Amino acid sequence: MFNFQTLLTNEEQARYLNAARQAGNWLSNTQNTVERPWGVVRTLDSADKGRYLEKCNLPSALIVPAAVWIHGISLFSLINLSKAPLVNAKQYLESAMLASKYLATLHCTVPEWEKAYGGFHEFFPGDAYSAPRDGATGAMTCISLYKETGEKRWLDMAIRFAQWYTTHGSDPDGYPWDDFLLDKGEGTSKKRGDWQAAGALLYWQLYKLTKKDEWKDCILKILDVFEKICANDPGNDTAYTFHGDCVISIGNDDFANVILLVGYRLFKEKRYLELYRKRMMAEWDRQSSSGAFPGYGGTFVTALEMLDLLEFQAETGIEVLPTEELKRRLLLAGEYTLTLQNAISTDRWVSGGVYGESNFGLGRDIIHARDTAYGVLLWLQLAGFHCQEYSSSEC
């Protein structure tokens, strides 16, 4: 792991750790529990017990429950946070364990839905809709739960999903569908986007756990399609908002770049590093003087990718991009992310949450769990703690 004490003072690391703590408070304080129900959105006896929020729209006072991917990243960010030396850190693990019960209800085991078995319901138990890439994050969460609890049922759940993901949940080339109707067993894609490649992070985590070549094969299939997407990039089909609307994502590629480093580690093909360099240079061209990147959640995603690259270069001795410039841009982005957190309000729907759903983090009307959970993962690592979910590391 890269030693951030060479980059940051003790006080700077403490600032990041405190920001992660406050973000963790927002995630756990807005969770639907018997003690703190959501009220008008869901009733006291709601099946949503343990579920996290996706976002709070402050002007309208609307709170939106999380889909499987948001629930998942909130859950595993709190598992990571519970390991930090914080007062009452156990509250984060308690929140995650409660959330795990809700996650389990999203796992699809409907006997009549033969081509859906092992997938994840997207929005609520029994939901017929699934976005397979979102389900992959749910399965990654199962791996985090397996590592935390040692309970094999979580690993089994992740493997069952991966088996579904690489068959029914993906197209004939092994690339994930955009959308999947669980009841009909049908997948569709509007267009193949680069962001879908990051679903291979699930296969990477399973390979590290099991050392089975089948997961390497799944990664290679995704890499092959990913390379073709980038090679055929028309240069004008990009998006700064939702990456599902485009071929090439700007700012938030949903961690697709990390898979290129994984590809190099597994197959030693230098072309993966060349493609990474090209893609990250395109991101650097769009970084503002404030440190922010475009794309909803883009500043956090790109910062986490740069952090992963910094660790990759430290571990392998391979300089994909100039290390000093990489450090400078990472710290500039990290410093900007701190400005996106509301650390003043005492309202539980706001306090510690991170503003999201805007390019370059300019909006201040929506607290979003995506940015809040990514903030926990980024800030913890800048404070010196490793998080494995969005990492190409072999550890």
Image (tube, rainbow, N blue to C red):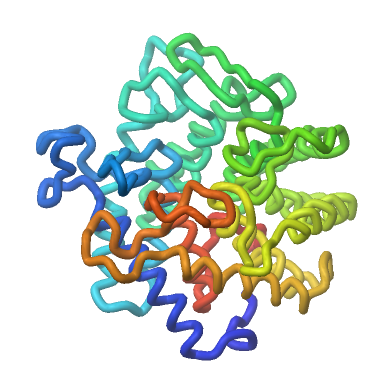
Residue 352 vs residue 57, the one in the foreground? 57
Q: Residue at x 34, y 45 (%)?
A: 57
Is residue 232 shown left or right of residue 55?
right
Is residue 322 shown left or right of residue 155?
right
Residue 217 vs residue 234, the one in the foreground? 234
Residue 55, x across and y down, in percent: 36, 45
Name the quadrant of the C terminus.
Answer: bottom right
Q: State how many labels appear.
A: 0
Name the quadrant of the N terminus.
Answer: bottom right
Q: Residue at x 59, y 58 (%)?
A: 299
Residue 346, x across and y down, in percent: 22, 66
Q: Is residue 100 visible?
A: no
Is residue 348 shown left or right of residue 374?
left
Q: Residue 230 lies in what quarter of the image? A: top right
Residue 68, x across and y down, in percent: 41, 37
Residue 379 drawn above or below residue 144: below
Q: Is residue 197 visible?
A: yes
Q: Residue 219 lies in what quarter of the image? A: top right
Residue 133 drawn above or below residue 24: above
Residue at the outermost front position:
59
Residue 200, x across and y down, in percent: 64, 42
Q: Residue at x 44, y 21 (%)?
A: 129
Residue 275 vs residue 285, the one in the foreground? 285
Q: Residue at x 64, y 88 (%)?
A: 6
Is residue 205 shown left or right of residue 353?
right
